[in-house]
Image (tube, helix red, strand yellow):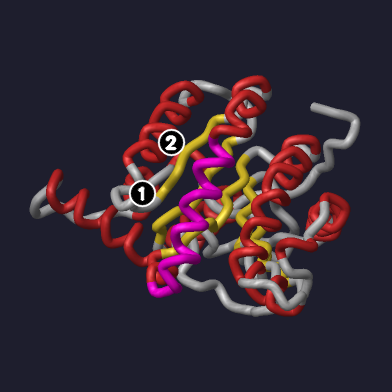
């Protein structure tokens, strides 16, 4: 815990949007925005750690992004590789647990190795859980999880708690806060299961202009919101609401 730590969202997910538009506004190719945006990632990861965030999940590349120009896709691949090489020492030094969720099979073999090696090195780390969603789609994650259950448990019914355990990175749990930069107000097939009770924050700031200060201010503002999860009073998690619901149902059924 640091002196900057705030009492707020434990799991924050970010849709890092607006890179291409940011570049075009400045009469530059779209890839220029991705290059600039990649520099912001390290700052936000560091700020999240300083603020006491336990899990940070970043939407780096969606299943739909394959439809973008090939040049742009290749630049995104290159930026991921550069990030892994540049930030490896910092991730290890800060006890950060790193993982990529999604399909990385079409990444260059060398980049895949960088990812797998860093995941292996940090799998037991107990600091910030940093997740990159790359080649990721929320619907695909749910379908993959259900198909895995069916294969392992033919003929059995799937319970919610079991599905939770079959997601790509189950240990990070539900999302408490979803931030989308760039001005658009949509979810874009991101962590569909995990954001069921998330607080949503849409900012017009495009990702290359997103700052530590704005991120910290969002965390502070969201920490002031009442989260009730269906109850009439504030509670800090869905589990508390469900426990109360179970108690109420027991009383109702007895009567």
Q: Quadrant of residue 193?
A: bottom left
Residue at mark 1 to residue at mark 2: CA–CA distance: 10 Å
The dot on residue 248 is none
Expressed as whole percent of the image width and height from the top left, the position of residue 53 reads 70, 41
* Type of secondary structure dominating the magenta stretch: helix
Q: Residues within 10 Å of mark 1 (few under 14, many from 20)?
A: some
Residue 243 in view (yes/no): no
Q: Quadrant of residue 21?
A: bottom right
Q: Is residue 182 above or below residue 15?
A: below
**Which residue is rendered at x = 43% and y = 43% of the image?**
169
> Does the stretch in magenta take in 9?
no
> Does the stretch in magenta take in 75?
yes
Q: Residues within 10 Å of mark 2 (few under 14, many from 20)?
A: some
1 and 2 marks in contact (CB < 8 Å)? yes
Q: Which residue is label 2 attached to?
A: 115
Expressed as whole percent of the image width and height from the top left, the position of residue 3 reads 90, 30
Q: Nearer the viewer, residue 120 or 189?
A: 120
Span colored in magenta: 67-84
**Which residue is rendered at x = 47% and y = 55% of the image?**
250
Q: Nearer the viewer, residue 237 or 8?
A: 8
**Which residue is rendered at x = 25% and y = 57% of the image?**
146
Expressed as whole percent of the image width and height from the top left, the position of residue 189 reads 46, 70
Residue 82 in view (yes/no): yes
Expressed as whole percent of the image width and height from the top left, the position of residue 251 reads 51, 57
């Amino acid at each position: 815990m640091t002196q900057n730590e705030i009492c707020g969202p434990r799991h924050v997910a970010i849709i890092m949007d607006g890179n291409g538009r940011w570049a075009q506004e400045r009469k530059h190719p779209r890839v220029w925005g991705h290059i600039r945006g990649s520099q912001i990632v390290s700052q936000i990861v560091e700020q999240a750690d300083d603020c006491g965030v336990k899990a940070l999940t970043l939407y780096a590349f969606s299943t739909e992004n394959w439809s973008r120009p090939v040049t742009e896709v290749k630049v995104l691949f290159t930026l991921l590789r550069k990030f892994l090489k540049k930030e490896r020492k910092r991730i290890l030094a800060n006890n950060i647990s790193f993982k990529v969720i999604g399909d990385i099979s079409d990444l260059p073999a060398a980049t895949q190795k960088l990812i797998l090696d860093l995941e292996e090195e940090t799998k037991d780390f107990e600091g910030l859980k940093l997740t990159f969603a790359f080649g990721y789609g929320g619907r695909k994650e749910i379908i993959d999880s259900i198909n895995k259950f069916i294969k392992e448990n033919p003929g059995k019914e799937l319970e919610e708690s079991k599905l939770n355990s079959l997601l790509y990175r189950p240990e990070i749990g539900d999302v408490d806060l979803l931030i989308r930069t760039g001005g658009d107000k949509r979810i874009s097939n991101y962590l569909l299961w995990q954001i069921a009770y998330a607080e949503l924050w849409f900012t017009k700031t495009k990702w290359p202009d997103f700052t530590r200060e704005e991120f910290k201010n969002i965390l502070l503002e969201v920490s002031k919101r009442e989260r009730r999860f269906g109850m009439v009073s504030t509670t800090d998690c869905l589990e508390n609401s469900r426990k109360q619901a179970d108690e109420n149902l027991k009383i109702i059924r007895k009567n």
